[in-house]
Amino acid sequence: MKVLVSACVFGYPVRWNSSSRKDESLKLWAKKVGIELVPVCPEDELFGTPRKPIRLEQIKDTEIIVGHMGGKDVYRTLMDKCFEIYKRDNDVVGFIGISGSPSCGISVGVKGRGSTMKAPMHLQSPVPTVEISSLRSEKNREIFLKRIKKHKEARSWTTMFTSV
Ligand code: SF4
């Protein structure tokens, strides 16, 4: 089973300041349960590394989200890139992100919003997603594994019925 993972969690130095957030235990667990991790970094693909950090903001009295990056709004570009990533790797069955990232986090702080929101890799995802912090417990790993297996099974049924 192929699962996308934030490239910085996989160990690539692709964060805005060229650092990583490598998690060796994830790799060991993935190998043990038959998951092939596929590292992906939407920001590095779009802007390279190092780059300026992105800050999300909701425009007052609207639902419009802006992704500030060095004076530019990159939110729409980021959403499109994440959509493209899932299209490109359409046999993946899950995504593992990292908390706090405006691209790969589940509960990201947004200036002027009063609540957190999912970042584009979760918003655009057609597969089950999670953050690495929640995969530190065996119980949560089991839950995620069940979710991606269920997704894989549902997709094979869909493929079977749409290909006849
Ligand atoms: S965009 Fe995602 S993969 Fe890339 S550095 Fe940020 S959190 Fe890591």
Image: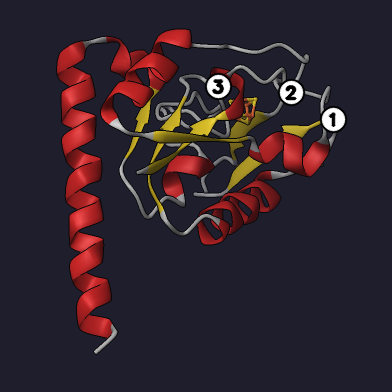
* Residue under pointer 3: 10
Rendered-image quadrant of the N terminus: top left
**Residue 119, percent across and down?**
49, 37
* Disc number for residue 53: 2
Q: Earlier in the sequence, mark 3 or mark 2?
A: 3
Q: Which residue is situated farthest in the bottom direction here?
A: 164
| Residue under the point 18% across and 56% down | 153
* 30 lies above or below 157: above
Dot 3 crowding, Cα within 10 Å, few <14, some 14–19, many 20+: many
* Residue 140 visible, this orientation: yes
- Quarter of the displayed picture in which ligand 1 can be seen: top right
The picture quadrant where one finds residue 117 is top left
Residue type pointed to by label 3? Phe
Residue 2: percent from the left, percent from the top? 41, 43
Q: Earlier in the sequence, mark 1 or mark 2?
A: 2
At 40% across and 9% down in the image, what residue appears? 25
Left-right relation of 50 to 105: right
The quarter of the picture where residue 83 lies is bottom right
Please report whichever mark, 3 or 1, sits nearer to the chain's N-terminal start: 3
Tag in front: 3 or 2: 3
Q: Work out how far the residue at label 3 is from the one at label 1, CA to CA, in angstroms.
A: 27 Å
Q: Residue 48, position in %: x, y?
A: 82, 34
Residue 67 visible in the picture = no
Tell me the kind of residue under disc 1. Gly
Q: Quadrant of residue 162?
A: bottom left
Q: Position of residue 35 (x, y in %)?
A: 36, 34
In the picture of the structure, the residue carrying the numbered disc 1 is: 70
Q: How has the structure been colored for display?
A: secondary structure
Q: How far apart are the alpha carbons under marks 1 and 2?
A: 8 Å
Q: Amino acid at mark 2?
A: Pro
Confirm or deny contact between disc 3 and disc 1 (CB under 8 A). no
